[in-house]
């Protein structure tokens, strides 16, 4: 038996090495850099705000034994009071003011930013592969605009179904992408026609969003609608975490892992992919559905946050190359890092510089970051477009 074991182990080790050979140094550096940037921004986000507390007090609140030592209180943040009580756990606890502020206001905002950044980056990477165009993103292809229009209709017109915002966002994004597909279809689709059709649909849907403002009579409703169209994380709490987390963990993450090799084959072109046995249109449609779910779940909790789905795949592709195993893993860490950093700047820049509690929508900050970065890419590279 010992001899058999000795013969099997080297083959097992060789197989494990081959399975992980795609994890190279550049990917590890990207992952570590993303974690470090997100952690540093989260450190600032949790420690500073209108309610004054020291760094030590803030992080003592994060690791408060009254939370971590009480499973009912801890689970109530992630599952909600009703679900936690259904498990037979008590959600009652006497928490300090610092703990309440950190756990109810600042920490959920970090989690929501991370989930939104993850989903938008993955969505952009998938759409760029499906269309074989590095200018593609859920924003460019009209998916974000479709989800945004559905949310605005819910807020302004169909207020009775406001509890179904994630579902309406997903339906709006899916309807917009279906319309793009129908416009681009001519006995099949092509990357160029998909992008052009997406730009047209996005323009029309954006105009319809603007038109809806004229039907809103309440100023508060108009302000909420504007916040959705610019992308904002102001006021998010654990409810938004509970909305976006299941879609991310149960659908987007496993689908992205499973779909990476299909995305690599799609980049070889329709003829080569067909010759390899892939049903191109079906694969394109299924992968697009995953990207729609990722984008719509983000729009449902943060509104239309521009540029993240466009620039993050570019940044990661520059660091780790075009293989989608490495690209998607890199996007999974750089996307959250970018949005947590951007949201920290959006929340605290006015307070630290002007001593004013004004908070910017995070979509403005991502636009200020993404625009110059994209101009830099245009100046640096001779060709920008087809992958």
Image: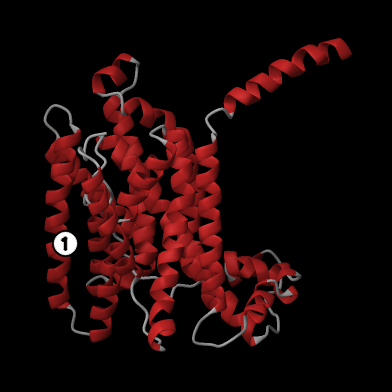
Residue 179, image x, y percentages: 17, 45
**Is the C terminus in the top left, top right, bottom left or bottom right quadrant?**
top left
Q: Residue at x 70, y 16 (%)?
A: 11
In the rendered image, is residue 255 in sight?
A: no
| Residue indicated by mark 1 | 206
Q: Residue at x 36, y 58 (%)?
A: 167
Q: What is the quadrant of residue 165 in the picture?
A: bottom left
Q: What is the quadrant of residue 372 in the picture?
A: bottom left
Label 1: few (<14), some (14–19) or many (≥20) C-alpha neighbours in 10 Å: some
* Horizontal arrangement in the rendering, residue 276 relative to residue 16 (left or right): left
Please tell me whether residue 128 is drawn above or below residue 301 in the rendered image. above
- What secondary structure is marked by label 1? helix
In the rendered image, is residue 329 in sight?
A: yes
Residue 78, image x, y percentages: 58, 65
Residue 243, image x, y percentages: 46, 62
Please tell me whether residue 31 is drawn above or below residue 371 in the rendered image. above
**Is the N terminus in the top left, top right, bottom left or bottom right quadrant?**
top right
Q: Nearer the viewer, residue 381 or 252?
A: 381
Q: Residue at x 36, y 62 (%)?
A: 300
Q: What is the quadrant of residue 10 in the picture?
A: top right
* Horizontal arrangement in the rendering, residue 114 relative to residue 54 (left or right): left
Residue 206, image x, y percentages: 16, 61
Q: Nearer the viewer, residue 198 or 348?
A: 348
* Horizontal arrangement in the rendering, residue 299 relative to residue 104 (left or right): left
Please tell me whether residue 81 is drawn above or below residue 381 in the rendered image. below
* Identity of the residue furthest to the right in this view: 2
Q: Residue at x 31, y 28 (%)?
A: 267
């Amino acid at each position: 038996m010992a001899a058999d074991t000795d013969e099997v182990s080297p083959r097992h080790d060789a197989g494990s090495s081959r399975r992980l050979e795609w994890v190279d140094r550049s990917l590890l550096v990207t992952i570590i850099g993303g974690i470090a940037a997100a952690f540093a921004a989260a450190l600032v986000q949790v420690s500073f705000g209108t309610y004054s507390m020291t760094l030590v007090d803030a992080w003592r609140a994060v690791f408060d034994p009254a939370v971590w030592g009480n499973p009912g209180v801890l689970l109530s943040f992630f599952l909600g009071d009703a679900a936690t009580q259904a498990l037979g756990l008590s959600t009652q606890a006497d928490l300090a003011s610092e703990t309440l502020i950190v756990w109810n206001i600042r920490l959920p905002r970090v989690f929501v930013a991370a989930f939104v950044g993850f989903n938008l980056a993955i969505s952009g990477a998938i759409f760029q592969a499906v269309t074989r165009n590095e200018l593609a993103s859920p924003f460019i292809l009209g998916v974000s605009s479709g989800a945004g229009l559905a949310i605005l209709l819910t807020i302004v017109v169909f207020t009775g179904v406001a509890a179904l915002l994630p579902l309406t966002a997903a339906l709006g994004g899916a309807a917009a992408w279906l319309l793009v597909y129908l416009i681009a279809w001519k006995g099949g689709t092509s990357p160029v026609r998909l992008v052009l059709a997406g730009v047209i649909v996005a323009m029309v849907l954006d105009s319809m969003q603007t038109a809806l403002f004229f039907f809103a009579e309440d100023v508060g409703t108009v302000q909420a609608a504007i916040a959705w169209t610019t992308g904002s994380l102001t006021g998010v709490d654990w409810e938004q975490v509970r909305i976006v987390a299941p879609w991310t963990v149960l659908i987007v993450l496993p689908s992205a892992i499973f779909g990476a090799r299909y995305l690599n084959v799609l980049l070889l072109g329709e003829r080569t992919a067909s010759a390899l046995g892939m049903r191109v249109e079906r694969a394109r449609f299924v992968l697009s559905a995953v990207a729609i779910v990722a984008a719509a779940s983000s729009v449902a909790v943060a509104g239309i946050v521009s540029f993240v789905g466009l620039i993050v795949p570019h940044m990661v592709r520059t660091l780790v190359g075009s293989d989608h195993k490495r690209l998607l893993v890199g996007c999974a860490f750089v996307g959250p890092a970018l949005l947590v950093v951007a949201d920290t700047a959006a929340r605290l820049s006015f307070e630290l510089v002007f001593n004013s509690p004004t908070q910017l929508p995070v979509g403005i900050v991502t636009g200020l970051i993404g625009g110059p970065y994209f101009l830099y890419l245009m100046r640096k590279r001779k060709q920008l477009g087809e992958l």
